Amino acid sequence: MLIIDMISSWDFPDADKLLRGAHGIVDSISTLKSRCRRAEVPVIYANDNRGRWRSNFPELVQRSLDTGGAAAAITRALMPDPDDYFVLKPSQSAFFGTPLELLLQHLNIRRIVIVGVASDQCVLSTALDARMRSLDAIVPSDCVASQTRARHSAVLRQFEAVHRLPTTPGPRIRF
């Protein structure tokens, strides 16, 4: 399971629009993460470094918690466990400029469940890059969000019709 950009202080342009969507999917992601843990499916967090080239993931988690409000609530609900993995990404795709591909090879992962925000940006880029690497990708419709419902609905149709990527809701995914 790959959780994209859900650990954040939400202090970037249009963050308020995306935060509403993120808040709406956090319970679904948390439930799916619990199922992954029980099934011994690895959980990987991928987050933008947002130009902070000296950043690290524990620092990002702490900054989100220190922000308080919805940012901290989302982080607490999706708090990384000590044995979870993480990559910091410089751009939209979790594969671009990160060791994600090597990590997936090391873990012998061939099927990846991609969740998080934004469904029509970072999730889409990552899903397409996963397919280019011959990975089976699933993007659960109830575990991704975008800035608007229209954008989100459009990308879900694109996942299914254009890219042939399943958008099976989280509770229906079998491990």
Image (cartoon, rainbow, N blue to C red):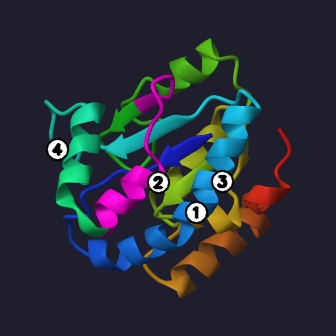
Q: Which residue is mark 2?
A: 77
Residue under the image location 61 percent in, 48 percent down: 114
Residue under the image location 72 percent in, 58 percent down: 163
The residue furthest bottom is 150
Q: Are discs 4 and 3 less than 8 Å apart at CB?
A: no
Residue 164 shows in the view:
no
Sequence-first tag of 4 and 3: 3
Q: Position of residue 40 (x, y in %)?
A: 71, 27
The foreground one among 115 and 155 is: 115
Sequence-first tag of 1 and 2: 1
- Label 2: state its secondary structure: helix
Residue under the image location 73 percent in, 34 percent down: 38
Q: Position of residue 129 (x, y in %)?
A: 57, 42
Q: Is residue 81 left or right of residue 63?
A: right
Residue 51, numbered label: 4
- Label 1: state its secondary structure: helix
